[in-house]
Amino acid sequence: MSQAEILAWTLPAAFVGISLIFFLVHLQVRGAFWWGIAYIVAAAGFAVLITDLPSVDDAKSVTEDVLLLSALVAMARGISQRFDRPSHDGLLLALVAVTGVGLAVALFKYHSDPAQYVIGQLCAGIILLFCAWQMRGGLRKTINKALFVVILLLAMSMILQQGYYLMSPFDTLLDPNWRKTQWMFFFQFGSGLFGLAFAFLALIAICLDAIESFRTSARTDPLSGLLNRRGFEERIDQLPALSATVASVAIVDIDHFKKINDTFGHNAGDMVIVALGTLLSELVGQGGSVARIGGEEFALHFKDLDAQSAAEAAQTIRRAFAAIEWPRPLTAQRLTVSAGVAEIASGGTLADALGRADACLYQAKRGGRDRVVAERRADRENSERSSLRSDGASASGDHSATDGRPSLFNPFPILGRLLGKSLSVTPRRRSGDLTSGQAL
């Protein structure tokens, strides 16, 4: 084998190696499996291209083009998966099939290699434009922008080149020596260069995705999908200085959670954790932050809410959770939570506020559970030391706002839309309101 032949086989060999990398990471990276398929098929296409088969040259040309176009279809499917778009495989494969017929007509009837090239390149340009279209709305990351630019530039280059080439005299399209011209060299060189450029950028994207995934895992609780303590602290640190805004924190704890696990099993306990996490994140909304900081313990940060308003929010959470009608094996079980609420003092720290909220939670537990205990700052002019008061006047832990303000949240749509759909958990209603065993 000559040096020229060894050099020619370097590209399909490199594509095979690239495909193996994509296959190795496909379980962690969306779209990587189909990118691996794309490079295997492209390697086969380039292998056919450089194989000398003069007796079946026309059939070989059609085969190599169909393989390379099929590789682009696989690439398009991978891009569609990465950007959460419908893949439209049937439409793209139909386009490749029609193009294959056009290639066969160009070669077997008109014996025109240039016409075959134009038809194949136009089809490739259309598929690449489809890939670029699938990436719309997902270009916030720099690496995705780079992929988009590479794909779009190649697609436009292919289409514009063929438009210019089609304006040439018809005799040029029938040139039997066309494969020895600069056009053919440019086609081979450009296709290989694009394949390597896309692979390079895609592998960078995979590495960046892996780094982001590790960072997310370090900040996220795997069961509930909420922030963990580290992520919670980092999120609060990103907010404006604590002394510049009013804010409060709450710690919510599931009552008798160990008994739930011991009696009904850990799967039931996990379901309760997920349900409460979903409820908390939806009720708190974008204006606050939620984290799971312990087994059955959750922390909440209420931006722009003082302790009293945060206590009202915690009461809404407590009532909504107590009103859930659980599926098996928790059927007919009434589960409750307790909460402690504290305001972040001017110039105070998150850790200090969480410590005081935890003290309030301890008081709620000692007071009978299923209640909210909130801290209310004493005389602002004389002292910034906080005094504790229980907002659970009744045995059920009910709390009513002293200033007559309405409840901050409406839990009905959330319980029905999220808990009811994902966990088969539905709220109990009585006279259009939540009930926790007694009239509210």
Image (cartoon, rainbow, N blue to C red):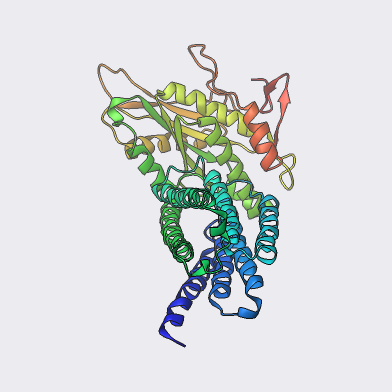
Residue 228 percent coordinates (x, y): 45, 47
Residue 176 percent coordinates (x, y): 56, 68
Near-viewer residue (275 or 382): 275
Near-viewer residue (143 or 237): 143
Going by the image, does 93 lie left or right of 364?
right
Is the residue 62 above or below the residue 75 in the image?
below
Residue at position x 51%, y 26% from top?
313
Query: Count of labels shown?
Result: 0
- The picture quadrant where one finds residue 26 is bottom right
Going by the image, does 315 lie left or right of 265?
left
Q: Residue furthest top?
A: 404
**Residue 33 visible here:** yes
Is the residue 2 above or below the residue 100 in the image?
below
- Quarter of the rendering occupied by the C terminus: top right
Residue at position x 49%, y 41% from top?
298
Residue 25 percent coordinates (x, y): 51, 65
Is the residue 4 above or below the residue 189 in the image?
below
Residue at position x 46%, y 26% from top?
310
Going by the image, does 395 lie left or right of 97?
left
Near-viewer residue (254 or 369): 254
Near-viewer residue (176 or 56): 176
**Residue 83 visible here:** no
Residue 382 percent coordinates (x, y): 25, 18
